[in-house]
Image (cartoon, rainbow, N blue to C red):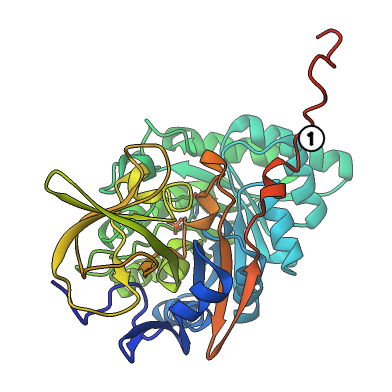
Amino acid sequence: MGEGVLTLGLPDAFLERDGQLFCEGVPLSRIGEEVGTPCYVYSETAIRRRYEALRAAFAGVPCRIFYSVKANGNVAVLRLLRSLGAGVDIVSLGELYRARRAGFAGSAIVFGGVGKTAQELEAGLEAGVLLFNVESEGELRRLSALAERRAVTAPVAIRVNPGMTIETHAYTQTAHYEAKFGVAWEDVESLYGLALRLGRVDPAGLAFHLGSQILSAEPYRQMLQRVVVLAEAVQRLGVRLRYLDMGGGFGVAHEGGPELDLGAVAGAAGAAAEALGVEILLEPGRWLIAPAGVLLARVLYAKRLGGRLYYVTDTGSNDLLRPSYYGAYHPIEAVRRAPATTLADIVGPVCETGDFLGRDRPMPALREGDFLAVGFAGGYGFVMSSNYNSRPRAAEVLVRGDAYRVVRRRESLEDLVALEEPGEPGSIQSL
Ligand SMILES: *Cc1c(COP(=O)(O)O)cnc(C)c1O
């Protein structure tokens, strides 16, 4: 039942020592006692290793890495990635603000997103972002008009919707026409023609994004081959492409099983870069950050209902939405190590039947107050959390060696109502 085999994330960051789980040199129980639970714990070493591994896989390819902020936008995490040499891929004004707070220069920012407002486009121009990934003719025209008003030229890539279905969760498939993303393949050339005529946009790149949690190199290989043909047609229009942005989506094998063959992806990317004479832009989120974090929780109660054993914990779907939203599998381990003796459902306190972290998991006998760690929670964890059931959002902790620091404090009860202006009953005179 997997005793002794740690599956929480990067093995040298989350490890077993003295019968306990550690993050690097810090016992998770110590963080749980001192910071409280629920709490996200990230390993600096893991983030570093992942970044270096990605660089190494793409060593032979002219490319730049733009970390996708939406996976985990904590400013401390962003600062760390900046120190390693990453740029960022952002999708909103809020992410732009975070990126700037973390010290990213405009030239280290790619601005994507299907529905950028005029305010967001303006802010991107103000920041001098490297590239706007444009997803509609309307956006291209609006961006050009805003650039004209500022007497600047906006560097753009048109994001093409590849019109193909890739094996991943339906909600993370972004590459077919039933999904709202990008520009239809057949409209791409005319949009570059328009970009040339508009004058205030510089068509510097071509972009695509296949989806998320993709574990096979094959879709990347196929898409890169197809997109080279499209990009060559665009080049024949007189467009001087400098970038091919191939998005993110690199998957992480949470459940074990074969990892994505990044070398094969890099090989295909290198061939495309060479054929087109462009630089490759990568926008990985999950791959860099998911295995670098766990969600730490405490068992509140153990109870039996019919034939099932439930461990009710102090964390749930408001903190980590992925199990109930995507049916995602996240490994769950007891922090105090003991052999698994039973199958249990690990659930949260939120008033929803779908509020579970894992079902039918082999677990040791746990007592009230025991700590559990939910693995591969570094990406799309905290960022998707909410205050549902008026639960203050979790703290976030960054570990480095034998030390840790709180990089986001736990929300307080005052935080929950801080933005509300209830007034006195009857104080609204007329609506
Ligand atoms: C979500 C997204 C990414 C990052 O996806 P991951 O699966 O986290 O790598 C990159 N680019 C675009 C355009 C995205 O929408």
Residue at 31% x, 67% y: name it. 367
Residue 234: image location, x then y, percent? 52, 47
Residue 393: image location, x then y, percent? 57, 53
Residue at 45% x, 86% y: name it. 24
Q: Mark 1 — residue?
A: 145
Residue 350: image location, x then y, percent? 43, 43
- Look at label 1 and name its amino acid: Ala
Q: Is residue 227 above or below residue 378?
A: above
Q: Is residue 192 above or below residue 79?
A: above
Residue 106 appearing in the image: no
From the viewer's side, name the closer residue of 423 and 222.
423
Image side of residue 396 versus residue 93, left or right: left
Image side of residue 185 versus residue 17, left or right: right
Q: In which quarter of the image is the C terminus?
A: top right
Establish whether ligand 1 lies closer than 8 Å to the Cβ of label 1: no
Q: Quadrant of the N terminus?
A: bottom left
Residue 317: image location, x then y, percent? 42, 47
Count residues near mark 1 (Cα–Cα under 10 Å), then give few for <14, some for 14-19, many for 20+: some
From the viewer's side, name the closer residue of 413 and 322.
413
Q: What element carries label 1?
A: helix
Write down the quadrant of residue 353 in the picture: top left
